[in-house]
Image (spheres, grey):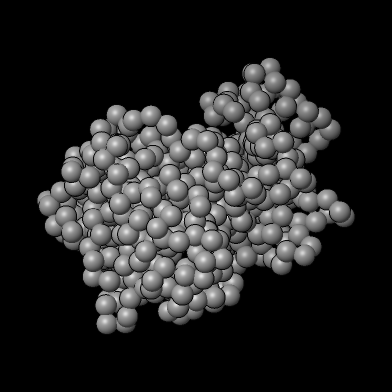
Amino acid sequence: MISQLTVFIENRKGHLAQACRVIADEDINMRALFLADTTDFGIARIFCDCPEKAAEALRGAGFRAKVIDVLGVRVPDRKGGLAELLEFLDRENVDVEYGYCFSINENFAIDVLKVNDASIELRLVEAGYALVQSEEVYALDDC
Amino acid sequence: MYYQPEIETMSEENLRDLQSERLKELVAYVYERIPFYHQAFDEAGISPEDIKSIDDIARLPFTVKQDLRDGYPFKMFAVENDEVVRIHSSSGTTGNATVVGYTEQDLVNWGDCVARALVAAGASTKSTVQVAYGYGLFTGGLGAHRGGEAIGCTVIPISSGNTRRQIQLLDDFNTDILCCTPSYALHIAESALEEGYKPADDLQVSAAVLGAEPCSEGMRNEIEEKLGLKVHDIYGLSEVMGPGVAWECDKQQGLHVCDDHFLVEIIDPDTLEPVEDGQWGEAVFTTLTKQASPLIRYRTRDITRIIKGRCACGRALTRIDRIAGRTDDMLIIRGVNVFPSQIEEVITQFEEITAQYEIILKSKGSLDHVELHVETVPDFPFDEVRKLEALKKDIARELKSNLQVAVEVKIVEPKTIGRSEGKAKRIIDMREGRQ
């Protein structure tokens, strides 16, 4: 599992900028950001260095922020790659709350999934999937 | 435990006799000393001799806040400056301030009233009382202070604000009783939790005597749980005296009025007629013993009711219910009467959100639009949009069924809702013509 920083953001002018500024002021580098938006609020899902430290700084600034465990999986870049992964999870009775694609290179995509069963990691490895380790996504040095 | 058992356990009949005696003296006193009352009695065709007992109270004219403003600064005083030892005053944001004077005896009586409340909350000479009400022209700080000293408690006059220090002294000085507003008590509790305290276990404080704003049952439960103590509601208003006019004993079944000092009536705010015991209405107080700033039938605009029957604590003192709101706080939303306390009652049922909230009223065309801003508790799984949307829907449904008014619920960041160290501002009325 890798640590994703989740921040609740009101749908108001400047609030996302404020959250990013708090993280920047802590001297923390952000690696990726994904937004889920509704009419009056958004959820920012962030990969950054030192996620716990970033969450604490955000909470201190009056945000709701927490660190969530998500699954990072390498999916081969070919037709049906993601479908096979999701079918596998389905067979294993694992629910996916949300997911997004984090990065793509020539050979594979990194997909991030919020699942309800952390033990699926082991079964994925046994089935031949390559999981993403936290140090591939963000740094935990000097936290 | 009683502070003044001779008064607190006096029979109802003797209390009524005492009140009648004092009322007769009062009407003669104000008629002679305060031109405003002299004129008001004359206009009502009443002479002091007409008042034979408290049953005649309804013949007397009312006093309203505007009368006190018009008397600014000292026209409503019944004594000369040399007898006045203290002045308190309410803010003058909506006109002249109201000014209230106290003689030394007034302060002694006030101290007694507050002391009764503190003793009912478990105070003794051994107790340490932390007064986190604001000190100054506001009556909260010095009122609670005097009550604690009257008993012989150790009083910490920390005043409001500096929450970190409040928590430190609660811990280091082994405070037994905390006095402040309910919203500030909650703020202290939340801050202590954020700092890593387990306040319910770490702090010795066993009771909180909270006043100056209404406190719903839900908010009370939250404070009690988080701080690990018992909350005692205390009621008062500066025009009448300050905190201590009425307060809760350990039964928490309504607030005991200090009947020997104050005569309470509940009236219909529209017809001005007394309502039957048990019916909700506006509380009206007559001060029976005050020397410097006595009042006849002062309309508080606070909504409460008489609680019938005798309290299990043994006191015969009249009980009033927790203040449900103020006649001027009452919101008329799409023609429906709504008290902020009703909204608070619903909010505090939801464990997923904190007790901090804001109500924003806007006009949408000719219709009123109500927005409720709440924040989730820190451990709510706000990572999942689905759960946030479900929570919004649940709160809106519950409000609709309780208030008969549609409310748009918005979940906001904690920093959006202002934290208060005194009275919380919960309602923002942006409707046309209200700003």
Residue lying at 66% horizontally and 25% vertically, measured from the top left: A95
Q: Is residue B355 shown above or below A13? A: above
- The quadrant in which the N terminus of chain B is found is top left
**In front here: B158 or B328?**
B328
Visible residue check, residue A143: no
Q: In the figure, residue B321 lies in which quadrant?
A: top left
Residue lying at 45% horizontally and 43% vertically, measured from the top left: B322
Q: In the figure, residue B111 lies in which quadrant?
A: bottom left
Residue lying at 87% horizontally and 55% vertically, measured from the top left: B365
**In front here: B348 or B256?**
B256
Q: Position of residue A86 (x, y in %)?
A: 72, 27
**In front here: B384 or B343?**
B343
Q: Is residue B336 shown above or below A117? A: below
Q: Position of residue B46 (x, y in %)?
A: 49, 60
Q: Residue furthest left?
A: B126
Q: Position of residue A2 (x, y in %)?
A: 55, 42
Q: Position of residue B191 (x, y in %)?
A: 40, 54
Q: In the figure, residue B195 lies in which quadrant?
A: bottom left
**In front here: B264 or A16?**
B264
- The quadrant in which the C terminus of chain B is found is bottom right
Residue lying at 70% horizontally and 21% vertically, measured from the top left: A90
Side of B58 where A90 appears, left or right: right
Q: Is residue B162 shown above or below B183? A: below
Visible residue check, residue B299: yes
Side of B365 where A54 appears, left or right: left
Q: Residue furthest bottom?
A: B82
